[in-house]
Amino acid sequence: MESAPAFDHRHYAHCESGVLSSLFTHHGMAISEPMVFGLAGAMSFAYLPFVRLGNMPLVAYRMFPAYLIKKLPARMRVKYFRKRYSDAGQAMSELDDFLASGQVVGIQMSVFFAPYFPPEMRFPFNAHNAIVIGKENGDYLISDPVFEEVQRIAANDLEKARFAKGVLAPKGLVHFPMQMPGDVDLEPVIRKAIKKTANMMLHAPPFIGLKGIRRLSAKIGALGKKHDKKYIRHFLGHLVRMQEEIGTGGGGFRFIYAAFLQEAYQIMGIPVLEEASNQMTAAGDAWRMFALACAKAVKRREEPVDLEAIAGLLRQCGVIEKKIYLLLKTLKKYKT
Amino acid sequence: MEKKSVPQDANKTYDGYGTKVVYAVDEAGRYDRVRTTGWEVEEIVLRDVVDDFEQKAESARRRAMSGQTSPIEYFMHKRYLDLTGLAKGMGIAKWRVKRHLKPSVFDKLSQSVLQRYAELFDIDPKMLTHFKENL
């Protein structure tokens, strides 16, 4: 069966927000990637030392995978189709049915089984997102937001990628908008999303938000007491890799959020938003400094590592971000 | 980050795989998507883990040749997995995977279990059973 619904592939910074931006736009609601990221409240920080990833703590710079797919449609009042499967054969045949009916389909997949990724990036990471836009000669056509061009994947590989086992297993997840609302008044949605994000970053339980950032910097400062050089090197490298995972560039999520705040300013015209956007750009730059310092420590293996300095750079990210969230909390005083 | 300071470090990893997108501001302070060929920082931390896995794989390969471990260990490292990841990927308990790393147990593995390992590693099952001839 050949089927390829008309679809405009776009190249984005991050997979999940990119997929949603593409899908919403395809269904007639043009919405940018930063807007998706901001409205879904994807901005976050988490340092969970008790969750291990290959002997390293879980560190995340955004909300957990599939959060956006759940939150964004709810906040935008979009009727949304989501389904997971236990049977791979059924999942693949239903995918074909969707495509045949002209539907492009958001999927979750493991990059481990995606041959179109650079081999060095094919780690067992199960929470990658992409859109299946058609089928051609038995191969599937994939609009993967972190790639410039439309990619192809063999049916067998796609099936394996959709049914990879382990942490965050995709279980064949498919999703797409079913019905878009008419005109949406973005302002209340923006206000609500910003309020939630600011509160979470400021007041979430330990390990999350600013407290997580402070805890991680304390941990870095104390690494030398308990661990050898090799572990320290791996730990610092791990922090940066989690920051970059599947490509957003250093501090990438901060820049996406800054772009969201700027777009919010263009819509609402409240100067606080513009100021917060500028400061968030500074926060992104601070995260880049931190990543750079970690990478230097990884590269210069034999030289001693100034852990206190690296911890200080991370603390600085927290200091800058705290000001931003406090500033954003004053948003409610201003009416448009 | 300003557009002009977006790194274009031509990361080896993306060579032949196109560019990535990041958000950066132009002279007027407006955000836009900018293409990048990568940042050296990403390449350094990625190479560090990849090299680590390669070293482990090489050591496993030598030990497998001399009958001290099973080929499964070699392919585990080769595909960037650890014991936990491999057990999860196979959907079996970690202690069972550990047993499969013993050459004596490995030699008795059924065709279907070997097939499942091969599927996970994305290799021909012969690479496991005829390891010494192939590597």
Image (cartoon, coloured by chain):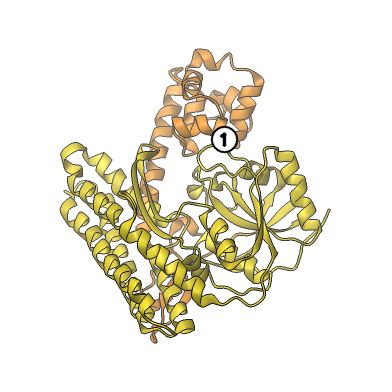
Chain colours: A yellow, B orange
Please state the horizontal and vertical placement of residue B109, each as a whole percent of the image: 59, 17
Q: Nearer the viewer, residue B134 or A264?
A: A264
**SS at mark 1?**
helix
Residue at 77%, 46% in the rendered image? A93
Left or right placement of residue B96 versus residue A157 in this view: left
Q: Residue A275 lies in what quarter of the image?
A: bottom left
Q: Chain of mark 1?
A: B
For the residue marked with disc 1, what is the amino acid?
A: Phe
How many numbered marks appear? 1
Please state the horizontal and vertical placement of residue A335, each as a whole percent of the image: 42, 83
Against A67, is B7 above or below?
below
The quadrant in which the C terminus of chain A is found is bottom left
Tell me if mark 1 has few (under 14), some (14-19) or many (20+) residues whose alpha carbon lies within 10 angstroms of its own: many
Left or right placement of residue A117 versus residue A44 in this view: right
Against A34, is A217 above or below?
above
Against A240, is A333 above or below?
below
Q: Residue A295 lies in what quarter of the image?
A: bottom left
Against A119, is B34 above or below?
below
Q: Is residue B16 visible?
A: no
Residue at 29%, 58% in the rendered image? A210
- Residue closest to the far right: A1
Residue at 29%, 60% in the rendered image? A292
Please state the horizontal and vertical placement of residue A258, each as a whole percent of the image: 40, 72
Q: Which residue is labeled 1 in the image? A: B121
